[in-house]
Image (cartoon, rainbow, N blue to C red):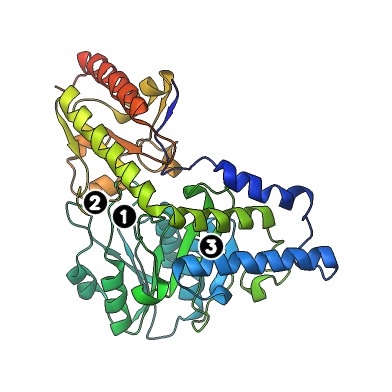
Amino acid sequence: MKVYLDNAATTRVDSRILAKIKPYFTEKYGNASSIHALGQEAFLALEGAKNLVAKAINGDSVNVIFTSGATEANNFIIKGVARANRTEKKNKIIVSAIEHPCVLESARELIKEGFKVEYLPVNREGIIEPEALRRLIDSSTILVSVMAVNNEIGTIQDITTLAKITHEHDAYFHTDAVQAVPYLKLDVKKMGLDFLSLSGHKFYGPKGVGVAYINRQVKIKPLIIGGGQEDGYRSGTYNLPGIMGLAYALELAYQERSAYLKKVKSLRDYLWQKIKKEIPNVAVNGSLKDRTPANLNVMFHSVEGEAILMDLSFKGVYVSTGSACSATDLRGSYVLQAIGLNKNFLNSNIRFSLGRYNTRSEIDYTVKCLADSIKRLRSFSPIK
């Protein structure tokens, strides 16, 4: 049996989405920047995709900028807003300590340019307390960036409250919402979001396409320049098949939201109950209450997470030890370190992320394999 439980890293493209975007490779292949009929047909499709995205997040289609993914969107927003709005009195940005590496690395790059960067701490459940932001924010702050849902431990932040505090100090607010679809009902107006990032492959759309939702009333410096597409905000030929796939997948994700949430929560809870029953000395990392229902990050005492991952992989079960973007970096997770996990346990964790195609029989098989792996690995572990 093959069991894929790494949906937070990427999802498989929904066959319905694949069928809908195929014509944009073979028939409707015009460049959306061309003025002939085939190009204008592509341009109208592009505008339709922007409308679908805007509707899903209650935004304005003119603010939807398509990118190569959320990594690009985050780089564009973090660097672009900071650089365009810097003055003698405003030169600080604030990011949470558990942001995705592309946000943290963007912040580090800005430090080299003379910006001041502050890091918002989280509590033991991975939640940012509003008072933590109030202590750090001041009149020199340009931008605050806090991810809506953490990619490793699935914790959900109160971004509405954090955005409100940010605006009280005349600063702008950005959220990396990559892991939030369809778990949160994203509403850029109600939540008070100036900027938001998405990535299509996290919700059963194609890889290589994302969204930077921007507030056009705020100055932002482009990251990619050249042909002047997206009104100069992001140059480059439009990836129309990817864009249409993202838009259709986002629409579908929210159309089927209720049934999807019910399914993944049932499977996640079933997985956790079976793990607790079959395997001793385990614990959940992060909050079980303020957490997306598809995420389960578990600490297995006395065993290296990489060893568990490889053992399960040989048995056809595919999981993660944390962020998929750090698969070649075996250092302890900075996210788990930020929530106060004992340093001896930073490498003893597995992230299970469930999705649309998982079944109960897959969970049964996973726990059987997991129990066998843990028993074998603990038998020769030097840590008891």
Is residue 330 among what the camera can see?
A: yes
Q: Quadrant of the C terminus?
A: top left
Q: Is residue 33 above or below residue 358?
A: below
Q: Position of residue 104 (x, y in %)?
A: 40, 58
Instruction: Identify residue for label 2.
Output: 338
Q: Nearer the viewer, residue 61 or 330?
A: 61
What mark, if any, has residue 211 been given in the picture?
A: 3
Name which quarter of the figure residue 142 lies in. Answer: bottom left
What mark, if any, has residue 306 been given in the picture?
A: none
How far is mark 1 from mark 3, CA to CA? 21 Å
The mark that comes first in sequence, 2 or 1, is 1
Q: Nearer the viewer, residue 66 or 53?
A: 53
How far is mark 3 from mark 2, CA to CA? 28 Å
Report the side of 42 relative to 153 (left or right).
right
Q: Position of residue 255 (x, y in %)?
A: 45, 56
Q: Position of residue 203 (x, y in %)?
A: 47, 49
Q: Which kind of residue does numbered mark 3 sit on?
A: Val
Q: Which kind of residue does numbered mark 2 sit on?
A: Ala
* Circles 2 and 1: CB atoms closer than 8 Å: yes
Instruction: Identify residue for label 1.
Output: 98
How far is mark 2 from mark 1, CA to CA? 7 Å
Q: Nearer the viewer, residue 314 or 301?
A: 314
Is residue 70 among what the camera can see?
A: no
Q: Nearer the viewer, residue 240 or 332?
A: 240
Q: Nearer the viewer, mark 1 or mark 3?
A: 3
| Residue appearing at x 45%, y 67% in the figure | 57
